[in-house]
Image (tube, coloured by chain):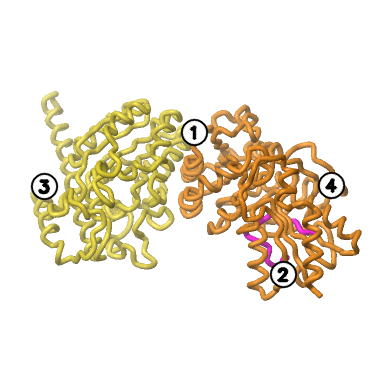
Amino acid sequence: MIKLAKQNNLEEQDLKGAYMDALIRQAEKDPRIVDVEADLANCINGPDFKAKFPERFFDIGIAEQSLSTISAGLSAVGKVPFCHTFAAFASRRMCDQNYISCAYGKNNVKIVGSDPAISAGENGGTHQANEDIALMRPIADITIIEPTDTALMHWAVRKAAEDFGVYYIRVQRTDNVQIYEEGSEFEIGKANMIRNGNDVTLIATGNLMLKTCLEAADALSAKNISAQVVDMFTIKPIDADCIVQCAKETGAIVTAENHTIVGGLGSAVAEVLAETFSLVPMRRIGVPDRFGEVGQPKELQKVMKMTAEDIAAAACEVVAAKQ
Amino acid sequence: MSPNEEREFRRVMENTRLNEMKKLALEIRIETLTMLAAHGMGHVGGSLSVADCIAVLYGSQMKYDPKNPKWDGRDYLVLSKGHCGPALYSALALKFFFPKEELMTLNHLGTLLPSHCDKNLTPGIDMTTGSLGQGVSCALGMAMGLKLDGKPNKVFAVIGDGESQEGLVWETMLLAPAQKANNLIVLLDNNKQQLDDFTDTIAPLGDMRRKAEEFGWFAVTCNGHDVAAIDDAIEQCRRADKPGFINMNTIKGKGWKEKEAVNGNHGVKGMTLDSVRPVLERFKTQLAALG
């Protein structure tokens, strides 16, 4: 059961900190867990894990392909490796290794990608993983989650550790607001209704875009448009039932993701709508089909047309298209 | 037993052990070629060049239990040059991991024996390979995991010289010594050829033994068609306190005279059991001569 937070206040802990806390907590219970890093341990509180479990911490250096394959090997002898690097490298650089040695080989590897898309900010176009979900999504049997806040992150790490199989956990870098009460129990492949509404459904993934959708919903209500907001924190397997239900209930959908609109959440939702004969007016908000650039996440959100105003405008369009 | 008698006893035992490995190598070649010819096509060259190495591993060096392929006391083998699965499948069948009849199902829909090694299909296969360069890095991960648990198991990985053009091989060259993976032994089937041409024509590897040594491995070169030499090289690696690297000089297509070290022997098409019969007969004659 999930319990929604009464207020969406800024959380004290960022999602990277929440990830590492959860991993350490899980590692205390499960001696199979190892932390594998590729010279970015300091960017995700890796030293905390190292201090606690020095033998179970591997920093292999700047070798992301090896990060994936070494993790597959560790899994093959019974370890549960959580391997971390920036999302850009976890997806683009490690793609074939993730596909063959981890997933096709049926190994138990948890791939953790931090700083996705515009949350990589000043690191610029080379480091902004706009397409990590799109690259991971075609891998059979993989589970893709973008934990929305610290409560969900704590749950997700535990779930990934307990389940056998390849997980991709996307860890946002920017400030995060609380969405759920700590101790909420979630379900893989089951989206959460964050706010009810009648006229349009805003489907988001990740804290940044969920928060932006909530702002957009506020702006829409001032225009007498009632928007429901859904947290699609599992991108694969996608909650098709929820999407169909939303299409039936509101007849208009806007997706919002911190990711290219090609191949990510928006595409996954569109696939469901098309294949279930549930086509309704729809818009995808996210990084357009272009490369990234340096800038503050807030600035990039404007440049990429991913603001609450952009979402509200798209919502107005799809609502208008219903008539 | 007097010291002289004991020495003589040991010599006879050692000769028997080496002879058994030689026989196993020929049996692997016979099964490999039979299976590929029955199928009509396949990776003949690299499977024949690696046969002696596989024979040493399964004839003497590795611990395994065919009745319990997942036995946790086993040594692990990762055939990183995964396309040479047929040579390994032959050894596994000859060592009773599965019935020999399975060999005739190579690459048939639903087979246990796909063109490239698959740990989830074939009893006795420890890692899925086929995308070159990845297997050897997985082997390092396995070695790291076993070391973490303080287990004595060894991890063997067989790579190709063509495969060594992959960057991931060189990441592993750098990382295995850094991780102090002295339970990992990599065997390079240096057969001097790759799919398109001779390796030297495309991207020469140079002295791989020296390179491995420079990277911090215990490294030796040996004749990859001499079972005693391979066996001795592995023994040397076992005694070293570093990851072991064995540069095996081999001949692609070894044993099939007409296909040895000639272009186009990587994957051979249009084979039939009839067309390879003379080669099989030669192998069988050599096998009979070993007693």
Residue type for callout 3: Leu
Q: Do callouts 1 and 3 point to residues on the same chain? A: yes
Q: Do callouts 3 and 2 point to residues on the same chain? A: no
Residue type for callout 1: Leu
Give percent across and percent down for residue B67: 36, 52
Residue type for callout 2: Val
Q: Secondary structure at mark 3?
A: loop
Neighbor class of circle 2 (other Cα within 10 Å; few <14, some 14-19, many 20+) is some
Q: Do callouts 1 and 4 point to residues on the same chain? A: no
The residue positioned farthest toward the top in the image shown = B3
Residue type for callout 4: Asn
| Part of the protein shown in magenta | A229-243
Q: In this rendering, is residue A292 above or below A243?
A: above
Query: Is residue B5 located in the magenta-colored stretch of the structure?
Result: no
The alpha-carbon separation of the residues under discs 3 and 4 comes to 80 Å
Which residue in the structure is indicated by mark 4? Answer: A8
Q: Secondary structure at mark 4?
A: loop
Q: Secondary structure at mark 1?
A: helix
Give percent across and percent down for residue A50: 60, 29
Which residue in the structure is indicated by mark 1? Answer: B148
**Quadrant of the snapshot with the C terminus of chain A:** bottom right
Chain in yellow?
B
Which residue in the structure is indicated by mark 3? Answer: B290
Which residue in the structure is indicated by mark 2? Answer: A244
Q: In this rendering, is residue B113 above or below B80?
A: below
The alpha-carbon separation of the residues under discs 1 and 2 comes to 48 Å
Q: Do callouts 1 and 2 point to residues on the same chain? A: no
Give percent across and percent down for residue B286: 10, 50
